[in-house]
DNA sequence: AATTATAATGCAAATAATTGCAATTGCAAA
DNA sequence: TTTGCAATTGCAATTATTTGCATTATAATT
């Protein structure tokens, strides 16, 4: 991967950001420093950085895919379908399981940000996610 | 969820299909029986069916998101970034780990098709995924 | 069977993401 | 330096997906 200004600025933007950013947000940020920037360049750079393992790509159910710089302490997320709550999942539990998967399938896992959807305690008690339809066994 | 013909036909289409289908493929299939069908109706129905747990939604790196009916024996996938190979991951290993996550976080996991990206044995030996860039520590 | 509330649909427009291709740029070799 | 190749970019067009709103259809109620 070449040391282009786009690669550099995107990485810097994501590292400085405390939250996940979507492609458009990254575009707007970097555009302040590279006014002639094209959105498709951002998409391609993000894809490149992701493939190189420098950033994570996740669908967190926000409409657009979000990106994050992969730093020292990795973490993952649980996202509630009911209320949208985002719960952090430590890397310990994940890393251990990935190792199992890798050992069992001769496969090197590169996924660096796992997102699991489901229902949080509160929504579960409210009965979210218990929909039963009658028209199918 | 109401018993509409769209819901019914989509579910039937996905159940009959041996492979994952993307939204457009589902649309084309169902359109043969409901000629006036609109693509956005398909997207909305797919979202509904997914939320009801009847189908799984996954980004398998094919450009478009793919859908699959959730049947008796669940399975998950490992997708190789190098060659695109798709390896099946049994549910046993996954279910057990989900249970751990659920127990540790008071969260009911609803994700019913996990996709992990990485590198298969062959690609790993070819050195895929080992890119090192010099311009960043 | 008529009424009613609400889910589902069609359509068009907006947004998100990808792709082909020609022009440009970074990096390495000469 | 200069040259050459391959990676990167811009641009426009395409594809993928979502959303607002008026209309239609379903299922429960009267």
Image: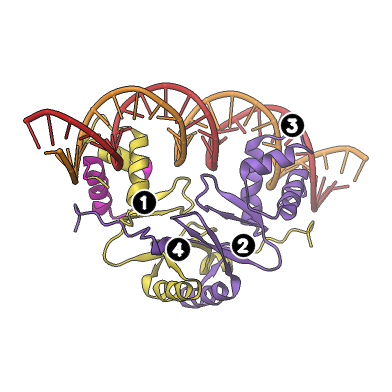
Chain colours: A purple, B yellow, C red, D orange
Q: Circle 2 marks a residue in which chain?
A: B
Labels 3 and 4 within one chain: yes
User: For numbered disc 1, what is the local secondary structure?
Assistant: strand
Q: Which residue is mark 3?
A: A36
User: For numbered disc 2, what is the local secondary structure?
Assistant: loop
Give how far apart the Cα atoms at labels 4 and 1 are: 29 Å
* Identity of the residue drawn at 62% across and 43% down: A23
* Residue A17 as seen in the image, left or right of residue B124: right
Q: Which residue is mark 1?
A: B67
Labels 4 and 2 within one chain: no
Relative image position of residue B62 (x, y in whole percent): 46, 49
* Identity of the residue drawn at 27% across and 40% down: B29
Q: Which dot marks residue B116? A: none
Relative image position of residue B27 (x, y in whole percent): 32, 39
The overriding secondary structure of the stretch rendered in magenta is: helix
* Residue B23 as seen in the image, left or right of residue A34: left
Q: Which residues lie in the magenta part?
A: B3-23
């Amino acid at each position: 991967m070449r040391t282009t200004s786009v690669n550099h600025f995107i990485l810097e933007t994501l590292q400085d950001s405390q939250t996940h950013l979507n492609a458009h947000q990254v575009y707007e940020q970097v555009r302040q420093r590279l006014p002639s920037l094209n959105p498709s360049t951002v998409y391609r750079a993000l894809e490149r950085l992701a493939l190189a393992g420098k950033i994570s790509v996740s669908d967190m159910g926000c409409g657009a895919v979000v990106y994050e710089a992969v730093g020292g302490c990795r973490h993952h997320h649980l996202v509630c379908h009911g209320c949208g709550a985002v719960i952090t999942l430590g890397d310990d539990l994940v890393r251990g399981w990935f190792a199992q998967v890798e050992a069992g399938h001769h496969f090197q896992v590169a996924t660096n940000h796992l997102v699991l959807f489901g229902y949080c305690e509160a929504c579960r008690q409210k009965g979210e996610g218990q929909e039963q339809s009658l028209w199918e066994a």
